[in-house]
Amino acid sequence: MSDSGTSPVIPGSQAPHSRAVLWLITLVAVGLSLFQLYSAGIQPLGLFYQRSIHLMLIMVLAFLMFPLLGAARARGPISGLVDLLFVVGALITGGYLALYLDEIINRAGFWSQTDIVVGCIATLTVLEAARRAVGLGMTVIGLIAILYAFAGPRGELPWLGQFLPGILEHRGYNLDRLVGQLYLGQEGIFGLPMGVAATYIFIFVLFGAFLEVTGAGKFFIDLAYAATGRQRGGPAKAAVIASAGMGSISGSAIANVVTTGAFTIPLMKRLGYKPHQAGGIEAAASTGGQIMPPLMGAGAFLIAEYTRMPYLEVVKVSILPAIMYFGTVYLFVHIIALKQGMQGMSRAELPQMRDVMGAGWHFLLPLAVLVWLLVMNMSPMRVGYYAILTMLAVAVLRFAVWFLFIAPREGQRVTGETLREAFKAGLIKLMGGLELGARNAVAVSMACAVAGIIVGVVGLTGLGLKFSSMMLAFSGGNLLLALVMVLLASLVLGMGLPVTASYIVLIVLVGPALTAEFGVPLLIAHLVVFWYSQDSNVTPPIALAGFAGAAIAGAKPMDTAFQAWKFAKGLYLIPVFMVYNPEIIMGGPVPVVVWNAVIAFLALGAFAAALEGYLFTRMSWPVRALLLPAIVAVFYPNLLVEASGAAVMVLALAGNWLANRREGRAAHG
C-alpha cells in the first residue's frame, strides 16, 4: 500500500518499458483491481478461484513490470522471449486450476501427470516472480525449503539427507508428493498467506492507493504539522504522528519513509536535527506504522486468521502497545530537541488547523466508515470495499460541489466542453488509483506466495515441531533466552524477507514452542513474533527503512541505521513486557491493567532518558546506571519488585526535574 503526499517509488516503475508494455501493465493492473473489487463486494468467489486468478494476474504484472535483467536494462529479443515464457507460465498456473478445479478435487491424492507438470511450472514461475518483485533472498529461502523436502532416504535427493543434523532429519518426499502439497493442496502456494494477500491485503492496498491519488495523504501530513509544528522539534514530532497515521494504511515501512520522509526529513534538518538523526527518526516512526491499528500493514489480518480471533479484537488489544511505541519515539525526538536547544517553527511557516480541516475534512469520512463497519463486525474484505466506494463518492461529490457552485463564482463557466474535460480527468485519476493499487500489491502477494511454499514444506516435514524442540533445548526452558532466540531469528530472516513473510515463516516455526512449551498465550505469541519481524527495517547491517531515510537525508546509511535502531528500541522492550505482563493484552482487573500500563510508560520513558542522558536537563552517569536495573525490575512479574523499580525511576526522574529547576533559577538569579 502506498503512503501519500508525493508519489511513492513504485517497484518496477523505473524500468525502461516500451509503450506497448506500459499499456499492458496498465491493462492488467486495472483488470486485477476490478476483479478484486468484484470478488470483494459483488460476487465472492470460492477459495481456489479467488487465489489462483489473483496470483495469475499478480505474476503477469510482475513479469511485465520487472524485466529479466533488472530495471536498468531494456528488454532485448532473448530476455523479452524469456519474459514471455514466464507470462505464459503465470497464465498456466492460475488458468489450469480455475478451469479444471472440479476434476482436480475429484482425483485428490491420485494426481495425473499433467497435474504434476503444471505444478512444477507453477512453482518455478512463483520463485522467479518473487526474485524479481521481492529480491533474491526470498527465492533462495524458497529453494532451500524445496531441497529440504527432497532430502531424506525416500526423497528425490536422498544424498542431501546426510548433511542434515540429527534433529532436522526426515523421511524425504518425492516430486509428486511435494507438488501435491505445494500446488494442488490448501497448505502450499494457495494456503493461508496467499488467501490473506488475495482478499484483505489487496483491498486495503487499493484503499491506500485511492487515498494517495485523491490527495488524502497530504491532508494527514498537514494535519500533523498543524498539531505539532510550533513545539520544540515540531517537524520531527509531525513525522512521528504522520507516520503513525499513514504507516498503518501503508503496507511498507520503506514506502512510508520515501513518501512522508520527503516532507519531514528536509524540515527536520532545517530545524537543527543532524541528517542521520532526521533519517533515523523517520525510519523508526515509519516502522511503527506497521504495528499501528487499524491495519498494522496487513499484520492484523494475518494474526486474526492464524489465531481465529475476531479482527476487531486483534486491533483493540494492539492499540496500547502501539501508543507505547510511538510515545517512546516521540520522547526521543523531544529529548534531542531539548538537548540541542531547538525551537518550533513559526506560525507563518505552518498550515493552520482551521484551513487544513476546511480543505480536507471530507477525507475523514472514509476512515469513519471503515472504523464503523469494523465495529459492526463486517468482514474486513467487505469493509475495504465499502471504504473505497466511500472514498470515490466523497471525491466525486467534492469535485461536483466545486465545479457547479464554487467555480462559477470564481468566473469559470460551466460548459459541455469543461464537463467533458472534468469527466476525462476524473476517469484518468480513477484508472491511476486502480493501477497504483495493483502495482503496490505485487511485492506483498509474491512474498506471501513463496511464504506459502515454506509453510507447505514446514507442514509436510514436521519442521515446526523440530524447530520447537531445538528452541527448547538451546534455551534450557528459559523464556527470556527463548525470546532472544526469536529476536535473532527474526533479524536473520528479515535480512532476506519482507516483514509479512518473515512473520509467517517465524510464527510457523516458533509459535508452537512459545505457546505449548513456554505457556505464552496464543495472541501474545503472535504479537511478539509480528513485532520482532519489524526489526530488520531498523537494525544494522540490513536496515532497509534506515537506508531509505539516509538516501533522503543525504546521510551515511550505517549512521542513519544506527539512529533508527536506537529510536525503535520499543520494538524490543514492549513485546517482552507483553509476555511478562500479559494483562495489558489479555485484560484483567482494571487496577492491574492500569498499573501495568503506567509502569510500562514509566519504564520506556526512563529507558529513553537513560539512553540519551537527558530528560529535563543533563543526567549524570550514576543516575543513568541506577535507572537500568530499575527498568529491568518493572519487567519482573512480581508486584514488590515492580513497585521498587517504579519508585527508583520516579525518584531519579523527579531529581532530574528538580536539577533543571535549580539550573533555571541560577540562570535567572
Image (spheres, rainbow, N blue to C red):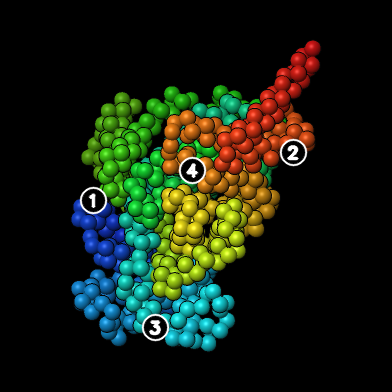
Residue 540 found in image quarter: bottom right
Q: Nearer the viewer, mark 2 or mark 3?
A: 2
User: What kind of residue is marked 2?
Assistant: Ala
Q: Nearer the viewer, mark 1 or mark 2?
A: 2
The numbered mark at residue 41 is: 1
> Disc 4 to disc 3, how far (Cα)?
45 Å
> Relative to 112, is 472 above or below?
above
Q: Which residue is mark 2?
A: 625
Label located before the other in sequence (4 or 2): 4
User: What kind of residue is marked 1?
Assistant: Gly
Work out whether residue 480 or residue 65 is closer to the camera in this orientation and state it: 480
Q: Nearer the viewer, mark 4 or mark 1?
A: 4
Label located before the other in sequence (2 or 3): 3
Label located before the other in sequence (1 or 2): 1
User: What kind of residue is marked 3?
Assistant: Leu
Q: Which residue is mark 3?
A: 175
> Disc 4 to disc 2, how far (Cα)?
28 Å
Q: Which residue is mark 4?
A: 582
Q: Is residue 249 left or right of residue 278?
A: left
> Residue 557 location, x and y as percent?
66, 53
